[in-house]
Structures are given as structure tokens and as C-alpha cells.
Amino acid sequence: MYPFTYHRPDSVSAAAKLAGDAEAKVMAGGMTLLPTMKQRLASPGAIVDLNGVSGLSGVTVAGGKVTIGAMTRHADVHTSAELRKAIPALADLAGWIGDPMVRHRGTIGGSVANNDPAADYPAACMALGATIVTDRREIAAEDFFTGLFDTALEQGELITKIVFPVPQKAAYQKFRNPASRYAIVGVFVAQTSAGVRVAVTGAGESGVFRVKSFEDALSKDFSAKAIEAIKLPTDGLNSDIHADAVYRAHLINVMARRAVDAAK
Amino acid sequence: MSGTGIGARVQRKEDFRFLTGKGNYTDDVNRYGQTHAAFLRSPHAHAEILSIDAAAALAMPGVVAIFTGDDLAADKIGGLICGWMIHSKDGEPMKAGAHPALAQGKVRYVGDHVAVVIAETLSQARDALEKILVDYKVLPATVATSDALKPGAPVVHDVAPDNAVYRWALGNEAETEAAFAKAAHVTRMDIVNNRLIPNPMEPRAAVGDYDSGNDAFTLYTTSQNPHVARLVLSAFIGIAPEHKLRVIAPDVGGGFGSKIFIYAEETVCVWAAKKVGRPVKWTSDRTEAFLADAHGRDHVTHAELALDAAGKILGLRVHTTANLGAYLSTFSSSVPTYLYAPLLSGQYDIPAIYCEVDGVYTNTAPVDAYRGAGRPEATFVIERIVEVAARELGKDPAAFRRQNFVTSFPHQTPVIMCYDAGDYGAALDKALSMADYAGIGARKAESARKGMLRGIGLSAYIEACGIAPSAAVGSLGAGVGLWESAEVRVNPIGTVEILTGSHSHGQGHETTFAQLVSERLGISIDNVSIVHGDTDKVQMGMGTYGSRSGAVGMSAIVKALDKIEAKAKKVAGFVLEASADDIDFKDGKFTVRGTDKEIDFASVALQAYIAHKFNGQELEPGLKESAFWDPTNFTFPAGVHICEVEIDPATGVTRIERWTAVDDFGNVINPMIVEGQVHGGIAQGVGQALLEGAVYDATGQLVTASYMDYAMPRAGDLPSYQIGMTQTVCPSNPLGIKGCGEAGAIAAPPAVINAITDALGHEDIAMPATPLAVWRAIQKHQPRAAAE
Amino acid sequence: MATVSMSVNGKLVSRDIDPRTLLVDFLREHLRLTGTHVGCDTTQCGCCTVHVDGKAMKSCTLLAIGLEGAQITTIEGLAKGQELHPMQAAFREHHGLQCGFCTPGMIMAAVDMVNRKGNHLDDQTIREELEGNICRCTGYHNIVKAIHSGAEAMGAAK
Ligand SMILES: Cc1cc2nc3c(=O)[nH]c(=O)nc-3n(C[C@H](O)[C@H](O)[C@H](O)COP(=O)(O)OP(=O)(O)OC[C@H]3O[C@@H](n4cnc5c(N)ncnc54)[C@H](O)[C@@H]3O)c2cc1C
Ligand code: FES
Ligand code: FES
């Protein structure tokens, strides 16, 4: 690691001020940031630790919406009884992230802000039509994820919470990379009053994306059969030693069908 | 059997310290005033070093020194060696390219050692690394095994202009030709044995220390064989003469072969300790382990099996290209030759075998012994081709194996080995019944109903362990003898210390060796301690690998215990006023035959030291004996493993549903520990078959350089195992032990692949059979099965 | 340099550290608690697992400076003198360790698993929950057995 100055603010506004410095990086769980720094791939001049800021964690369900504070740990999302009633698919998804130790520390805000193309939460945000709330504005998931490790966040802008509309039914199916256990393909399917939304993570060259053809077919007929014959184009899909684009395209279909079957 | 003697499931004595965090691994060692080393590694697979400018780095805070290959050369520090001479078919000695600990003029793989920074802290050493300026002229690289011998392939070492280290052969070519000429059926296969990265959980580490008052060095290091390390560092590399160099291998967190070898980093740390006048510590991070620990396997093979009309095997012909990487690591040359081809007969009576092996250089990390070393590669060839032959002939694979088993012993194979004892049919019967082989049809049908594919695969392996008779390996080119030493020190109050040249890095010697002593001397295992891993304490030893600690290491202890008993009888004779010939020793008591006179072991020990009851001129006081055991043959553990898999054709995911292992290890000292060795071996074998594979890209960059891309077997990837045993006693050592450390890793890969190919209905799949590979294999041959 | 204070195995400790200090280095280098091991650079192997405020975490991926006031338990804090914690005893009884390098992390993860999932664990749950702990020696068979039995024993000891 390179040297840095360490700050531990106790309020969002203090944190945002410190994070406004172009050299600074905020740290939530550190489960992505610290490994990158350890490998000397990132060299922030200052770390703004959000763990001292109160009021950023917790899950609340009200008025057909689930609100999850940015600092809520994956483990707490996974085990929230209220969430399990409202959007079981999201609670399940959190249980698929990393391992128990990573889930005790990593946060939803950090995951969403990081927008790793193989991360799980972005698929849920896109499929459920979540709103990312920051210290200064609200951003629709659609506008938030702008590309590989890229988001609409400005320097120093902090995610404070994420709001998920409760769907009628939803499910997430993940096909894990045998080595890293991140998603090779993760498909989140949500049936909402406005139609079906299908979001895919792990597969896209520029991160999470929606599958229009699946959405149209499933909106008409919410059954695995309805999408079975739809072949996805391979352009824009990743190829690596674990999965090439053809296999990923195929897996998206398989995982989507399994998600439809599992949706509740 | 006593409660803690031979054959008992004794809980391990060493566990308390490991369970409570009190183990003492090399990275736990800190010396007063120590500095930290970090290595600058080549980012290129092949390049000339035009210049190294360390001026800016030297000026960085905390930097104590920076050394390059020139500094080692100026101190006349020799290169790393390969200790086994292999001769090509034409009699030419192998072509060993120079292997300096820090590069001289050229780098030959990504991770190769260019320079070392020594600094006050590790962070400072790493900061300074980034400031060293190296001007490289990048050269084209030879990467793939199958490309190395192609005309025009970039040359790795000038001494081997065609990249061939050797072109070696074993067996009888003419007889094998004749066998094929009269064959009714020939099975042919191309087989790749995937390259693996060993990954013991404890990374390598070294702390070098220099005592200027005595002009003496100490090296603490993660070694499976500290005495061999000392021998090589002293006699070949020239750090210091042996009596001025102490090598200590404290607790070692797994080795699997990769900690046998003498590497650049350890060499540099101990040498540099004198240069900087302070202790120098280095601990590998995992990325460095991926890049620069010796890798394993990496064979490309064509094999052919000749059969008569009745299905009897007539001959086997094998050609293998073995990738040895960029330099010859310590024992690398022997692995694809003498540790490989002599095992190609498997459990079968094969009248004629001929095997050619081309060892090749490539611009990749050195390849050397990894759990099983050559024997898994041989077993994969024979157990795959036998399976495929059975299928081609429409025979049941179990029955086909049985038809060709060796059934009488001793059995001389056409490839050196003389199998001394075994009962292969018994293991097969037991395994088939434990695995419910007869019921597989129903289970396949049940899977099919769920849209899944089920398959079953056998592997009837044999291995040659307990390496090895020194004169025999010497005649095959080994640079060392492969005996083992032991010293038994009985203290005056009857407690015992066993000094052994074997080294435990997970095998539980502190327990099994103590069980042996407890059984022999009739004392509690709590009164026995095992001393190993320190060249100042143990005089000499060859270390632990090749499943040799039981068969060879314990045999040496037995020999020393025999001497102890003989001497103690003499002492007892004086005390009991009887002739030593009339003394019996049993259950810890010396008795005078035909009388009720007796004395216990501890009292005899005391008498031996106080020496009041005998004349010190006639009988030396004290009770301490040592012995060297040189084995008379290899030992031949064998067994049958059966793997049952279920494949999801929609995703290509393979799940192991059942694992049955029946092994014959001869006599077993502690079944609990032996079963643990089998479990661990199977996991590594399954890892090779399903998950693990080192991948270099076309330019020689290692793609799988962390756990993000190199898939290690986790608990969820593996089943629980059903373990059974059969027993034929090994005739070549006093305990009848055969060895168990490598069996699982040898047996498992073909069992898995035979099961997968059974499920798929064709043979076209390579290791690792990842979901992608399996799915592709399904697509290629059964396009319709793809649709769920 | 900055000062951090925390409780480690029930003892209050306070040290001046470089902010870059990872918890694992704080434990190993500053406190000489070398039972917590480092097996990887990518937060995957679990050799470094400790409990932070009662929850298992990977000490290689936590800044010590951020743990002001935290309660840390390491492998050295489990046994009472010569008396092993039930999970440690179960690992010994079932031969759940060979080289011992992964063992401290395995045991800390196992105790945490029981804290979360209760005393009656089936094999599949245990295997899934070990996602973040790699062992190269044992093939996991005996680790699974040990955790199963250690979980029961922890229940009985309550
Ligand atoms: C072994 C391992 C396995 C993993 N497996 C998975 C997996 O399967 N699926 C998966 O999705 N993820 C996985 N992860 C990543 C994990 O989910 C991380 O927790 C997550 O990606 C980052 O969250 P964090 O809280 O740790 O963020 P940090 O690492 O602290 O921060 C990540 C980035 O987000 C920024 N950031 C953090 N919080 C905020 C905020 N509130 N506002 C603005 N910016 C912020 C930081 O500046 C940084 O750039 C894994 C991680 C590890 C170590
Ligand atoms: S060292 Fe912490 S997870 Fe590997
Ligand atoms: S016991 Fe050696 S890594 Fe687990």
C-alpha cells in the first residue's frame, strides 16, 4: 500500500467535504478498495472512512418501497426479516456475495458505487428499478451505472441509501466463477406492475444491462417457456478463460429461465 | 495393539499448538534488527536486460541495499542446480542452462528474479522496487509445451538450440513394435496433463541470519528437506561450508513438493544477510507464489495400447513432451522420466512397453515435482487408455481391468519396477461393492429423468513410493542417495527424543513416529518427542516427499531402536545379573527368561547413564543410537478409486455425487492420519480434474496468477469420501509400510475424467473439466442436449 | 503515525501505527500474535479470519486504525489455558487439520458459523459456509466432520 492520510468523519456532510478532494477515496467495507490498494493498483492520498458516520445503515420497508442504507452490510441485507418478506430475491442475492466474512463487512453502497461488472447488486438495482440516493440527489439505476467500474457519481458524492420498489415477484440466479465466485452470469428477473424487467450482470463488456427481448416475452407470458427459444447475440459479451461469449449468452438464457421458475 | 501403539487412531500430539495459534512458521520468526527483502521480477517472458539503474531506488527512504546478478557473481555464488542427470537416448547428457539466482543478462519467464531490494520495512522495500529502472529488449517467447520443439521456436537457452533438454526413452522398442504388429485392436489417444500450481496455504518464506563472530549462517526457511537445502546451498551454490550453515525448517504449512526445491529467494536472503550485516527476511505473497513456485505436471502425450482379440493387453507405446519451464529446478529432470515411465504398467500385466519423453524448455515458470510427481501423469495415461480400450471393445471397464491385472508377485514390469506384493482384485471387489457399481444403471436412469447425465469412472492406480534404494537411483542419474537417518536419544529418566531426517509439514510425524516408539519401548507417547527440521540438531536427512517418511524414515527409526534394545538388554543384564542373551524385552519390561526378575525401561535408562553396575570400559555408558536406512526396493501402494458424477447439461456443471477409495498401504500406523492423507490427495486430484489449470497467454503472461482466476477446490466443490482399505504387507521394510501421501492425487484425476466421459458418451474432454469445457464438449457431440 | 486502541482477546491494547497497517499486521507484528496467518493477497483464503465485535472478518482486509474501540478475538483467545474451546477440541478429535496453516482461520470461521446458524449443522450448510476458507491439506472431509461435532459440543457446553 502507498501511504495515505486517514480520516474518520462522523457525519455525511463532513465526509462529503473530505471526499471532495480529488486525492481522496471514501471507504465503506473496504472489501474492494483495500485489496486494490494492497496490490498497489490504487493510491488514494486520503481515505475517508464511512464507518464512523451514523445513520447510514439499516433496512426499512414502507409504502411499497424498501430502503437500504448505504452502509448496510451484505450480511444484514441477507438476514433482514422484513426484506425477506418484501423482496426475498434481494435477500437471497446478498447471501450469494462473496463469503460470510466478506458479507460481514462489505456494504451495498460500496458495491453499487464500485459497479464491478461481475457484482451482484447492480443487477438487482436495474431489474427492480431502484433509485440511488446520494448526499445531493436521486439517481435512477438506469442512469447510475454508466460503464465498467463507472457510475454517475461525482467526486465526493456519497451514496446514502438505495430505494427499491417492491415487485410482484422476483428472483436472482447466479452462475459463479469457479475461482473468484463473482458472477460469470447473474440474472435478476422482476415482475412489476409496469411489466417484467430482466437485468444481467457478469456477462457484459460494459457492466450490467437489461435484456429487452426477454422482458417483452416475459411481460406477455411470465414462464420459462416464453424465453426458451430466444437466442441472445454474443456481441458485447465478455470472453475469458472461464467463459466465452457464446457460453455466457447461453447461460443468460438458462439463468433467466431458472429465475422465472424460482420467482416469488 | 496398545492404546497409542501401531494401528491406533491416536489424536495428534502436534495439534495443540496449531489449534491455539502457537505454531511456529517461518514468517513467525523475527530476528533482532532484521531487514526486509523484496524481489524485482521480470514482467516479460523473455528479454535481454540491457541495463539496470538502481540509483533512484537506493536513495529511497529505508533502503539498505540493492543487489543484482552481478553482485552474486562477484561473490562467486553459484547458480541453482538440478540434481538428477538424465541422458538422452543417444547418450548425450541433458542440456542444463545456467540458472543464476538473480538474472544475468537475460530473463526467461514472467516472475524471473532481476534484483533484490533490502530495506528497513517491507513497504519501503516495495516502494523502492518501483524506482529501479530496467531497460529490457523484449524477445519472442516460447510458451506452449507443444510449440517448444517446433522448428524456429524462440530458443530459451543457447545450450539447447532446439529447446530439448533431453530426448529420453525407456522400455523395449522392438518388442513393443512386435506387440503392435500382432494386435487385433489398437486404442490411440492424445492426452494433455494440465499444468498445476501447488499452492500450499503457507507461502514460502526465508529469514537469513549471519553471525560475524563465528562466521556462520542460519537460514530459517519453508523447506521439506532442510538438509538437502543445506547441502545444495553449501556444496553447489557456495554460501558457506556445511558446518558454517545451519538450516532450520520450523513448522511448515504444507509443501506438496513445492518446498523441496532450493529457490532463488532463500539463497539470496541467506547470502545477503552477510552482505548487509543484518538478518534479511522475505515472505512470498500469493502472487509471487503463483509466478515463481515450481509448477507441476504439464505433459502432452500420445499413447497407444495394443490388444489381442480376447482383450488382453499386449503392449503400450507412449510419447510424451514434458514442459520443464525456463530452468531446470532441483529435481525436475527426474519427474517426467524415472518417476513417470516406470509407472506406465499400472496394475496390469503388460508384456511390452516403450516410452519416449522429450523434456523441453519454455518461457514459463520451472516445473518440478508436485504431489505424486510423474506418477499421476503415468496413471492418467494408463487409466484413461485402459478405460477407453474397454469401451471400444464393448467390455465392462471393471471386468476389463480385472482381466489384465497382475496377479502373481513378485512381478517384473518391462519398465524397471518389480512389484513386490499386492492383491489388486481384492481392492477392486471391495471398491465395486462399496460404490454399488451394480446399481449404477438405475441411478443413471434416475438422473436422466431429471434431465441430468450421470457417469461412473474407475481408476486402478499403483505408485512407487518410499523412494528409494540409493544405488538404484544413483544408477539412474540421481545426485544424492535416498536413505533416511534416525537417532534415538534415551534420557536418564526414560523419556525419548527421536531425531529424524524426515520433515513433517502436515503429515503428523510427531504422532506416528511417537506411536512407533511407544509400541517398541512400551512407554507413553507423551514421553516421546520428535526432533526434526534443524540441521544443527539432526545430523543428516533426506526429507519428506514421495511418501517416504513412513517406509524409509520410520524404518531408520526401527533400526536405531533395535540397537537401543540390544544395548539396553546388556545394561539390564548387568543390573539383573544375567546374560544379555537371557533377557527378554516386552511391554516396557526387561525380564530374565525363566525367572521373575525384571526391570522397567526407565530404570534401565537411568542405569545406563549412572553406569554403576557395569564396567565403563566393557560397555559404554549412555543410551543413544543412530541408524541410516537405505531401502531395498520402492514400495508399491495401490488401490481402486471410483468416482460418480452428475452433470447438468444446461450449464456443464459437474457434481461429484460419490467417491469410493479402497487403498492398500500395507501396514498402517495411524488410520486416522492415513485417511486424512487420502482425503487431501483426492481433493488435489479432483482439483486437477475439475478446477485447476495454470494458463499462460501467448506472450507468456500468467493469466491465473491469483485465486481470482486459479480455482482452488473449496469445501462446496467436494464430496465426503468413503474410504476402505485392503492390506498386503510390504516385504521390503521392517514395518511393512507402503506409504499413503500421494495416493489420492494419483488416483483421482482419471477416475473423474472416466466418470465424466461415461456420462457424456464420448472421450473428447480435457482437464480441467470446467463447466465451460463440459458444456462445449456436450455441444460438440450432442447439439440437441444443449437445450434444457 | 496515529494511535489506536482496541481490545484484543479481552486485553486493552494501544499502539502508535502507520495508518496503512492492516489488522493482521497489527496482530502479528505489533502484538506478536502470530496465530493469525496470511495466505493470499486477494481476501479469498480465510487464513486471517478473526472476530471483530463478535463477527468473523478477514483481518488482511481491515485497517487497524479504523478499529478504535473494537473487540477483537483471535485464535489465541479461544482456549482457556490448556482447555481447548469445543471447536478446537473437535478439530483435534476429527483430525480437521494437517499442516495447521489454515486452521486458525477455519476455527474462527467455524465458531462464527455456529453463532449464526446454530448448533445443528448439516454437511451442506457447513460446506457452503466455508466458501471463504481454503484448505489445501485436508480435502475438507474431516473439517466438515469437526465443525458438525464442534457445533453440537458448543451447544452442550452452553
Ligand atoms: C473475496 C471476495 C469475494 C467477493 N465476491 C463478490 C461477489 O460474489 N459479488 C459481489 O457483488 N461482490 C463481491 N465482492 C465485493 C464485495 O461485495 C464488496 O463488499 C463490494 O464490492 C464493495 O463494498 P465495500 O463496502 O467493501 O466498499 P469499499 O471497498 O469500501 O469501496 C468500494 C468503492 O466504492 C466507493 N464507495 C464505498 N461506499 C461509498 C458510498 N457510500 N458512496 C460513494 N462511494 C462509495 C469507494 O470509494 C470505492 O471506490 C467480493 C469481495 C471479496 C473480497
Ligand atoms: S489472507 Fe486474508 S483472506 Fe487470505
Ligand atoms: S491444514 Fe494445511 S491448509 Fe488446511
Image (cartoon, coloured by chain):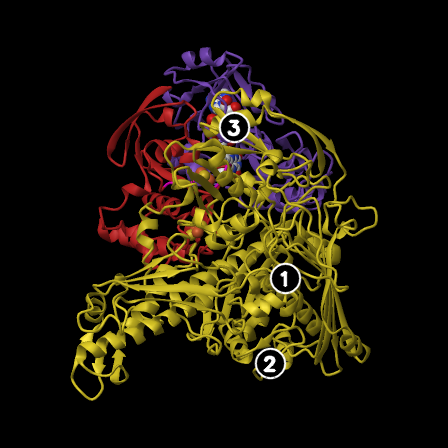
Please determine if labels 3 and 1 lie on a single subunit.
yes
The kind of residue tagged 2 is His
Q: Quadrant of ligand 2?
A: top left
Residue matched to label 2: B411
* Residue at the image position 55 percent from the left and 73 percent from the top: B437
Secondary structure category for the residue under label 1? helix
For the colour red, the matching chain is C
Q: Residues within 10 Å of mark 2 (few under 14, many from 20)?
A: some
Report if residue B41 is visible in the image: no
B11 lies above or below B283: below
Chain-order first, disc 3 or disc 1: 3
The CA span between labels 2 and 1 is: 22 Å
Closer to the observer: label 2 or label 1?
A: 2
Secondary structure category for the residue under label 2? strand
Q: Does the magenta stretch mainly form a helix, a strand or a loop?
A: loop
Secondary structure category for the residue under label 3? strand
Residue matched to label 1: B377
Which residues are drawn in magenta? C36-41
